[in-house]
Image (cartoon, rainbow, N blue to C red):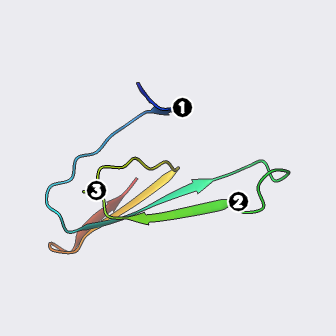
Amino acid sequence: MKVNGSAAVLDQLKLEGYHWLAKAVEFFDVTDWNNNLVLENKFIPYRKRSYRGNLLFAHNQEKEAGFFS
């Protein structure tokens, strides 16, 4: 496990090609502090950023294939 800033990085993916679209979905459980219990981030994975979430949906537009985790 690597520490990236203040968040621990548990897993990383390297996707072949540049035609991927992805969505990370994060769930919150503390309703006293968060009015929005679900946060979705849509992004292009080849840009070097890190995203956090509980679910990951990825779609390769070139090969019409994808996965979720």
Q: Position of residue 49 (x, y in %)?
A: 36, 49
The mark closer to the camera, 3 or 2, is: 3
Tag 1: amino acid: Ser
The mark closer to the camera, 1 or 2, is: 1
Tag 2: amino acid: Leu
Tag 3: amino acid: Arg
Which numbered disc covers residue 47?
3
> With 4 as the anchor, is 13 left or right in this view?
left
Nearer the N terminus, badge 1 or badge 2? 1
Q: Residues within 10 Å of mark 1 (few under 14, many from 20)?
A: few
At 32% across and 60% down in the image, what residue appears? 67
- Label 2's element? loop
> With 58 as the anchor, is 38 left or right in this view?
right
At 49% across and 63% down in the image, what residue appears? 41
Choose top left, top right, bottom left or bottom right for residue 66. Answer: bottom left
- Label 3's element? loop
The residue carrying mark 1 is 6
The residue carrying mark 2 is 37
The answer for how far apart the CA atoms under marks 1 and 3 are is: 21 Å
Q: Where is residue 18 in the image (x, y as percent from the top left)?
A: 17, 63
Nearer the N terminus, badge 1 or badge 3? 1
